[in-house]
Amino acid sequence: MKEFIFSFMVLLTCATVNVAFPRANYTILRNEILEYEQRLMIGANLTLNDIERAANKVLMKVKKEELNAGFKNLSRYAPARNFLAVKEDIERSKVFHLLRRMPKGAVLHVHDTALVSGNYLYHNITFRDNLYVCIDKGVINLHFFRVPDKSCSWELLKKVREDPERAEKVNKMIRQRMSMECDDPASAYVDVNKAWDKFVNIFSFITPLLTYKPIYEDHFLRGLEELYEDNVMYLELRTTLPTLYDFDGTKYKPEDLVDIYQSLTQRFKEKHPDFIGVRVIYAPTRAAGRKEAEYYIKTMKRLKTLYPNFMAGFDLVGQEDLGRTLEYFADLLKNIGERNINFFFHAGETNWLGTSTDENLVDAILLNTKRIGHGYALPSHPFLLELAKKMDIAIEVNPISNQVLRLVDDLRNHAARPLFSEGYPVVVSNDDPGLWGARALSYDFYEAFMALMSVHADLRSLKQLAWNSLSYSTLNNSETQKALDIWERKWHTFVKDIAYDNSQLNRQRTTTT
Ligand SMILES: *[C@@H]1O[C@H](CO)[C@@H](O)[C@H](O)[C@H]1NC(C)=O
Ligand SMILES: *[C@@H]1O[C@H](CO)[C@@H](O)[C@H](O)[C@H]1NC(C)=O
Ligand SMILES: *[C@@H]1O[C@H](CO)[C@@H](O)[C@H](O)[C@H]1NC(C)=O
Ligand SMILES: *[C@@H]1O[C@H](CO)[C@@H](O)[C@H](O)[C@H]1NC(C)=O
Ligand SMILES: *[C@@H]1O[C@H](CO)[C@@H](O)[C@H](O)[C@H]1NC(C)=O
Ligand SMILES: [Zn+2]
């Protein structure tokens, strides 16, 4: 830090009288202040080597071009508008293409049945054999059967699709019920509650579709495939551990599902040795009463004993404003924290300061949560923020989720911005990409890089984000080191490719002119 600004800061913190800037050289002081602020930003501690600096030049050139275009004409700036309306714009962005190639580390906040892109659900899963459809009072339902039950007038979907007229109608209904995507999101989802109604409705539609065991397995593997293609190498998956079904009436217990995740992960790793793995965060609903909560906690303890490494920990899910508070469960939860069971609570996913949802942040911290899901309200709580910082609790920021679920419209107003500008340990994640037309992690990285961070945030900030995602995972020290080693090799290739592509491009330009 520059001498003058430093002594001035000391003066400010000690002074009990008014302090004013001295009449020193204005330009120099101004630059020192800007520099000092940039030293606080996420990634500012990192030093880039020559190749990284060359890659950074390429990245910052396109970033500034795109931001400039948006500054001149806001309709060319995607983060200001709902993701549901600007997905294609993002896909045309050069910054986005670079982010897709970047080794991003881990996804630490995503939910099992929303892991996979909607296109796969529609184009692949709804075209499988044995899938039945029933339209009951205008509401479409899907379920796999060997022989359909009597709960609805089920028809084989394949058969229905043989009739072009019925196919068109039924396909449209399916597409509408499985995604938040629509032409005019602002009027379709006027507020948080309307958005959540639709969101919950999608889950109730896709759950019977996805919990047919063979489908659940394919879906999970497909999820890993999509993450891997997007250069993500590790996953901590939140799951309600839903009860699977098959045609033999087998009763699958929570441990059976964990066992399935574990063996499929193993299979995936054999095919992709540079994929580090998966761990599971058991995350049942916060709508539970005391009895159910006791059952969930008992289940968690049993799973932790059976799969001590694979089970990362515990969380509660569902719309926080409507569900039960963490305080309601606190006496049940506070003792299991001591049994080596880590917490990863969703908390403060709200715009209502001072409400019980907001105060969930107090309980999450008091219960020694390892990370906070969303923590949207945290930057408005100076003391909680200070505590979280001292306790080194990472915040899982999910930009698109917060926008689609209507906490914020223009992502330049996202509450987590100060966390990025003061180098707080944040990770960027994707929450439910399958429900809003996204895929894997890059879209959220794009929004974070272009809207939640400063114009000046560069390759160092992105590198820090990837590093955070592995360091704030549940991997132990030696596992983290191993993951970081693999990641570094990928990173080196990534920056070399970008710097090289660019020098090739320049060479072509010089030879053709
Ligand atoms: C202030 O510093 C800048 C940069 O060193 C210099 O160009 C400028 O002449 C100085 N201004 C004054 C009034 O001394
Ligand atoms: C702003 O950008 C949009 C989208 O590219 C374009 O249709 C519109 O004509 C632009 N407006 C101005 C004033 O350039
Ligand atoms: C669905 O995906 C699986 C791989 O998960 C593939 O083997 C199969 O051919 C696909 N089916 C359709 C109808 O696209
Ligand atoms: C840089 O490192 C120091 C020392 O570890 C730490 O206190 C500070 O928060 C870091 N700053 C950033 C922006 O990461
Ligand atoms: C970290 O985990 C590995 C298994 O992946 C284990 O072999 C090692 O002992 C663990 N290290 C510590 C310090 O717990
Ligand atoms: Zn979530």
Image: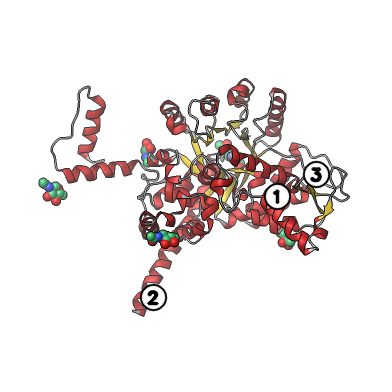
The residue that disc 1 covers is 264
Looking at the rendered structure, which numbered label has been put on residue 245?
A: 3
Q: Amino acid type of disc 3?
A: Tyr
Q: Residue at x 60, y 34 (%)?
A: 319
Residue 161 x, y percent position in the rendering: 78, 60
Q: Would residue 70 be visible to someone looking at this image?
A: yes
Residue nearer the viewer, 482 or 137? 137
The location of residue 51, given as percent across then percent down, is 38, 60
Pick the residue in front: 112 or 87: 87
Q: Are marks 1 and 3 in contact (CB under 8 Å)?
A: no
The image quadrant that residue 183 belongs to is bottom right
Left or right: 134 as drawn, with respect to 49? right
Seen at 65% across and 57% down, the residue is 119
Sequence-first tag of 2 and 3: 3
- Residue beneath label 2, please? 508
User: x and y percent of residue 24 in the render?
Assistant: 13, 40
Please identify, in this view, whether the residue under mark 2 or under mark 3 is nearer the observer: 3
Instruction: Identify the element where label 2 is drawn.
Output: helix
Image quarter of the N terminus: top left
Q: Is residue 199 left or right of residue 354?
A: right
The answer to whether the residues at label 2 and label 1 have Cβ atoms under 8 Å apart is no
Sequence-wise, which precedes: disc 2 or disc 1?
A: 1
* Three-letter code for the amino acid on which mark 1 is drawn: Leu
Q: Dot 3, how many residues are within 10 Å of its Cα: few (below 14), some (14-19), or many (20+)?
A: some
Residue at (49%, 60%) from the top-left corner?
97
Query: Against 326, is 430 above or below?
Result: below
